[in-house]
Amino acid sequence: MNKISEKTDIQNFIQFLKENNIYQFHFVYNQSNKKVESSHKELQFISDFINSDKRDFEEHEGMFFQLTDKFDVLQGAFVHRTKRGQAAGGVRFWQYDTIEEYFRDGMRLAKGMTHKNALAGLWWGGGKGVMVHNTEIDKQNIDYREYIYTEYGKLLTHLNGCYVTAEDVGTSVEDMANIYKSTRFTTCIPDYVGGSGNPSEPTSRGVLAGMEAALAFKDETLAGKIIAVQGMGHVAEPLIGHLFDKGVEKVFAADINPDVVNSVKKKFADKNLEVRVAEKGDNSILFEEVDIVAPCATGAVLNENTIPKIQAGIICGAANNQLEDHDRDDKAIAEKDIIYVPDFLNNRMGIVNCANEQYGYVNDDDFIERHLLKDWKNGVYQTTLSVLKEAKETGQPTSRVAIKQATDMSMELHPIFEHRSQKIINSLVKDKWFEK
């Protein structure tokens, strides 16, 4: 095998792990020397890559991994900051080409959850699960999915609760039920076992609230507007319905899955909806001459290649980590006088809906519904207005304003357990969890 590095493709990395008999491993930030340290000397090259990164790494407390015995699926739990509580965030089932691509996405997603949970006022830290699909196997194979999600639950059990998972892109409620078979450290489990189920509908309502706030900042409403939606999946589909309910004139929408496109087209057959199937990496839906573009698929779609082509006056969507490079891309958006509603501000409702499901349910739950009220200070609507106002007054891009607010809140210690998850991580390292 050629020299291994962060540029190595995932399959060769998996082969490298097997050759070195490494099936569980970690990278943990050492507070004393301010360096990321690996569980295995063979993986030092990844520690070096993380330590040298100035874009996506931000003192992530720990990153934990396992390679499944069957199907060769690489599974990870990325933990960013846990001062407010255990790291919380969904598990993504996706395809990655290289080690670098995989690690960068995991680090960005975990950091985004820290911002999202803090800005929503939740007593949770930020984390994210990421599993790499083995492309040699049918992604919809029932035995494949049951096995890998059950194995992922076992990983979380090994991690003693420093990270609590949930549903995310590529993962279904049925998959969450399989995780629940092997761990207690999960939310978004099916309602038939007392869980909150699919969080997509409340997530779409949060995005809608962000759009309405951005328009209100311009003394406008959704009535008569034209919207472009990238993605037509679990969140985008109900969002499209809400947009028509609010009186928009037209919606453009695109997705890479032809079956999804046809399904949504049929559902809204009587509406002014123009759809198309897009190839992977095709972001042209964002370039339509519309009032608002809503990225609701994957992240990093707002970058130096796409931003110059965007004609809309507002960007507000459900996708996580829409900016490829925060420092570069939020500035570029601001320079075009585009109002950008940071994704972690308006797509909070998924985690709000499921994060505290262990406390039970009531009808029209105020702890959930208040986030969607226009007059609640900490709701999506008012927080969006606050960020837009501060950005206008200071000349700072909206993303930087929101991140500053979220970062300040993420430094607050949990009122009961303080920084307990950091203690859990320290004990995992001390006990060499990866050898058990």
Image (cartoon, rainbow, N blue to C red):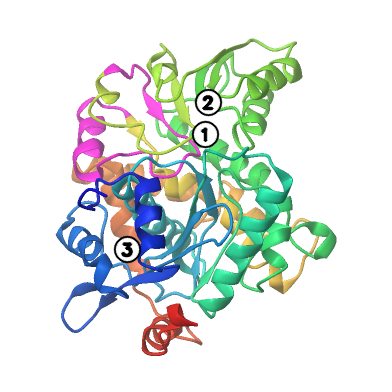
Q: How many marks?
A: 3
Tag in front: 3 or 1: 3
Tag in front: 2 or 3: 3
Label 3, on which residue? Answer: 407
Crowding near the residue tagged with mark 1, few <14, some 14–19, many ≥20 C-alpha atoms within 10 Å: many
| x and y percentages locating residue 300 in the rendered image | 35, 37
Viewer-side residue, 231 vs 118: 231
Q: Which residues are magenta?
A: 309-338
Q: Earlier in the sequence, mark 3 or mark 1?
A: 1
Kind of residue sitting beneath label 3: Thr
Cα gap from disc 2 to disc 3, whole angstroms: 31 Å
- What residue is rendered at 51% in x and 20% in y? 227
- What residue is rendered at 68% in x and 27% in y? 241
Label 1, on which residue? Answer: 212
- What residue is rendered at 42% in x and 89% in y? 431
Label 2, on which residue? Answer: 221
Crowding near the residue tagged with mark 2, few <14, some 14–19, many ≥20 C-alpha atoms within 10 Å: some
Q: Is residue 361 visible?
A: yes
Crowding near the residue tagged with mark 3, few <14, some 14–19, many ≥20 C-alpha atoms within 10 Å: some
Relative placement, left or right, of 358 versus 302 is right
- CB-based contact (under 8 Å), mark 1 and mark 2: yes
Reply above or below: 306 against 176: above
Kind of residue sitting beneath label 2: Thr
- What residue is rendered at 76% in x and 70% in y? 360
| x and y percentages locating residue 244 in the rendered image | 66, 21
Q: Secondary structure at mark 3?
A: helix
Viewer-side residue, 220 vs 72: 72
Q: Earlier in the sequence, mark 2 or mark 3?
A: 2
Cα gap from disc 3 to disc 1, whole angstroms: 25 Å
Relative placement, left or right, of 280 versus 257 is left
Kind of residue sitting beneath label 1: Glu
Cα gap from disc 1 to disc 2, whole angstroms: 6 Å
